[in-house]
Image (cartoon, rainbow, N blue to C red):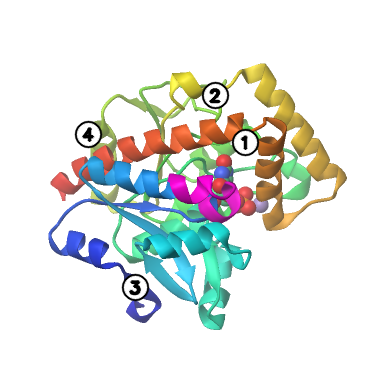
Amino acid sequence: MKSFITLSEEVRTAQEEGKPVVALESTIISHGMPYPQNVQTARDVEQIIRDGGAVPATIALLDGQIKIGLSNDELDLLARSEDVTKASRKDLPYLAATGKHGATTVAATMICAAMADIPVFVTGGIGGVHRGAEHSMDISADLEELARTNVAVVCSGAKSILDLGLTMEYLETKGVPVMGYKTDQLPAFFTRSSEFPVHFRVDEADEAASTLHAKWGMEMEGGAVVANPIPEDYAMKEEFISGVIEEAVQEAENLGMTGKDVTPFLLQKIQESTGGQSLDANIALVKHNAEVGAAIAAALNKKS
Ligand code: PSU
Ligand code: MN
């Protein structure tokens, strides 16, 4: 196992000294945001985690090697290069075997974080059950990963490019607790709430950490979702964003898009049609999640 993974000096030292570490994904850098906002956000998020008393570990595959903790040059490569594959669970073995670059999704980042004993991971939004999944069977591998891998994902819920109701049903079936951070409803990424209740509300980082500690203390397999709403000032108007999403979903369907290209296509369409407003929202929510994630990682670290 160890030969597939390299830890950065900063992450290795943090773990030796028993400091909290927070994992970060790289699909959001390579396939979720445009350059140069992607690399700037990646760096800012890392700094927010340091300021919160934890150590950031951005995860990617570089030349087939799983890297836990990236240098500025490595972040830059992921942000600029066209030659970085979106890497979910199914992609990791081939990319490792052929020495390629891969930007890890939520699923793949969870796998790599678990290999490196990092229990808390911060991102923007998770994948889920797509609209029309009863025909397309398009259900993100992120959900299966949450069911089996012991990593908590701090996010702003999921975008309504997905069927949020079915996504919540799937998570319930798989036994993945969804905790609303200071909220009773599942945040819908660009908006602070949705019509779907979370499983539990937590009002402190310590409550989330205690729940994780209890789950893993009972040796129950799998992760959890901590859903933290977008900051009020950046939240988008529900009618506006749902119209934009509706159009994007329709266009993807008309083009017959399938598989791993669907989500990046939808994200890009939304960015185009909101003239950057959705990008600002995306950046703001990830930064807020980094604050909350660092606090949860610190609280959990004290318990172990
Ligand atoms: N949702 C977002 N931004 C993202 C993603 C999802 O709002 O960047 C990325 C994440 O990496 C997530 C992946 O794990 O897309 C899900 O892709 P798929 O639906 O193909 O599983
Ligand atoms: Mn899919």
State how far apart marks 1 and 4 are (Cα).
29 Å
Residue of label 3: 6
Q: How many marks?
A: 4
Mark 3 or 1, nearer chain start:
3
Question: From the viewer's perspective, is residue 94 above or below residue 210?
Answer: below
- Position in image of residue 303 (x %, y %): 15, 45
Going from N to C along the chain, the mark reached first, 2 or 1, is 1
The magenta segment is 29-41
Q: Disc 2 residue type?
A: Thr
Circle 1 Cα neighbour tier, 10 Å, few/some/many (<14 / 14–19 / ≥20): some
Secondary structure found at label 4: helix
Is residue 127 at least partly visible in the picture? Answer: no
* Residue found at x 30% / y 67%: 8
Q: Secondary structure at mark 3?
A: strand
Assess disc 4: are there few (<14), some (14-19) or many (≥20) residues with their C-alpha within 10 Å of its C-alpha.
some
Q: Specify which label sits upstream in the sequence, 1 or 4.
A: 1
Looking at the picture, tell me which residue is in the foreground, 232 or 92: 232
Where is mark 4, residue-wise?
206
Real-space Cα separation, disc 3 to disc 2, in angstroms: 37 Å
**Residue 77 placed where, x, y %?**
50, 64
Q: Which residue is mark 2?
A: 191
The reply to whether the magenta stretch includes residue 83 is: no
Q: Which mark is residue 166?
A: 1
Residue 298 visible from this viewpoint? yes
